[in-house]
Image (spheres, rainbow, N blue to C red):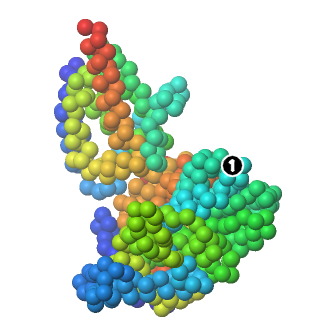
Amino acid sequence: MEVKTIQEIEADIIEDFALFDSWEDKYEYIIDLGKKLDVLEDEYKTEEHKIKGCQSTVWLAASYEDGKVIFKADSDAVIVKGLISMLIKVLSRHTPEEILAAQMNFIAEIGMMTHLAQTRSNGLLAMIKQMKNYALAYKMTQEIKK
Amino acid sequence: MIVAELRQQFPVLGRTVKDKPLVYFDNAATSQKPQCVIDALTHYYSHYNANIHRGIHTLAEEATMAYEATRFAVQNFIGAASAEEVIFTRGTTEAINLVAYTWGRQHIAAGDEVIISGMEHHSNIVSWQIICEEKKAILKVIPVLDNGELDMDAFNRLLSDKVKLVAVVQVSNALGTVNPVKEIIKAAHLVGAKVLVDGAQSAVHLDIDVQDLDCDFFAFSGHKVYGPTGVGVLYGKRNLLEEMPVFQGGGEMIKEVTFEKTTYNDLPYKYEAGTPNIADTIALKAALDFIAGIGKDQIRKHEHELLGYATTQLQLIPGVKIIGEAKNKVSLVSFVVDGVHPQDIGVLLDNMGIAVRTGHHCTQPLMKRFGIPGTVRASFALYNQMEEIDTLIAGLRKTIKMLS
């Protein structure tokens, strides 16, 4: 199975979004992604895994398998869940180095920049930061083991 | 009062958002400005900008007179006994902080009690928490009833001679509740406590008469009464202000400065250190004049109609629950929708050009009390129209459908 790079996955997403004519279509797609996001087990819905924005809450969990970081997440706001679903699609199952290098340009390209800019309003930017923190932590443990 | 005509005077209302006409329902956060206020600002900077109170040249005189004219306009607006009891600050938050750090520090001691309510905005919570912690005083909270009114029985039970201050909001920014502050002030005074009234939301909707209320302090913000940002008012009874220690040190608030000793200026300058926000303070008068020109009672009548209509329409939508159903409310309505996060609603409404506020509205303890992460809040001003509410309702129905 061919594994796509982060940039390739981002390009796919940008291509998908280019097909949308209206904001309704765009958001319906994101909401649908949000509804389909894998349920996060209760054990991860703790203070430790919480990323608080001003309005919505995001829970993020990470694990490390075969040199790849795997992310799981959830939110109480469904549009944020949809965006999280895309973030996971892009960043999950990649090496720490790839995750740390990711520019996340696709967010601006699909017109979702305001969701990032409102850093106080939702946990999205904080979540990306935290995902990169996890990647960095796994990278460090890798190096220590060497 | 013809709303359609008045709307013409507010340039922002003519814009589009995401190609849709703007429906501005976030007035409790800040109001839009009429052209006369915008003109007052540019006129000042174009014609007579100068530093005030100090210069003897013509521009300085003109600027000083315009600045002090606002002080008299505010005195009139709130019914203060003298203009010297009107102190200009940056806003309500700064006004409350000023009282906390001067009067608060001076009068609150270990074991004393400060009463606030469960519906306070963070600005009227945190300042008191800071002082209470510093002085080892105790902060007590008046509970909020399910309908969004204050539990006045509980309030009366909280009163004792240990209470030094009651700090309470006149109108809740999250619920719209109008609190019986006159009653609260009377009861507080009986036990020897002073009262600070947060008028940030009330100043634009209600007739304010600080002497009739007999409040010790009253604070409000210019930007919520169709005025500019960056200017607010602290009203305080003269005898209190005179004996309070100073707040910020600097020019203007002094009489004489030597390295050995400095004497302080009289009211109100004692609390207006440094070059103030001259332009915006001058423009505030234009806003107050604008309101007076229409008549607050006319505005209130219109707002009341908007509130009634919005409330009725919202109650017809399945899953919508209104938070804050006090008998006496100003024109704002907070609601939640079953199984839908307020932020999601706000985002989708924005795509329809509708501006509402979502979240905790800087009243986290209140949201916790109602067991919700936040609400969607639509707040109405003199320039809003029934048709806009129709747009909101239709938009909300569509939003709920998309999110279900």
Question: Which one is in front, A64 or B270?
Answer: B270
Q: Amino acid at mark 1?
A: Ala
Residue A132 appears anywhere in the view: yes
Q: Residue at x 34, y 26 (%)?
A: A134
Judged left or right of residue B145, residue B263 is: left
Q: Is residue B202 above or below residue A59?
A: below
Judged left or right of residue B386, residue A107 is: left
User: Judging from the image, what secondary structure is the residue with disc 1 in?
Assistant: loop
Give residue B305's quadrant in the image. Answer: bottom right
Q: Is residue B384 above or below residue B120?
A: below
Q: Residue at x 68, y 61 (%)?
A: B165
Q: Residue at x 40, y 62 (%)?
A: B259
Q: Label 1: how many residues lie within 10 Å, few (<14), some (14-19) or many (20+)?
A: few
Q: Residue furthest front?
A: B260
Give residue B346's quadrant in the image. Answer: bottom left
Judged left or right of residue B261, residue B80 is: right
Question: Which one is in front, B97 or B358?
Answer: B97
Q: Position of residue A2 (x, y in %)?
A: 20, 21
Q: How many marks?
A: 1
Question: Which chain does tag 1 point to?
Answer: B
Q: Is residue A65 above or below residue A32?
A: above
Question: Which one is in front, B58 or A125?
Answer: B58
Residue B39 appears anywhere in the view: no
Q: Which residue is mark 1?
A: B110
Q: Position of residue B310 (x, y in %)?
A: 56, 71
Q: Residue at x 23, y 42 (%)?
A: A106
Q: Position of residue B377 (x, y in %)?
A: 52, 62
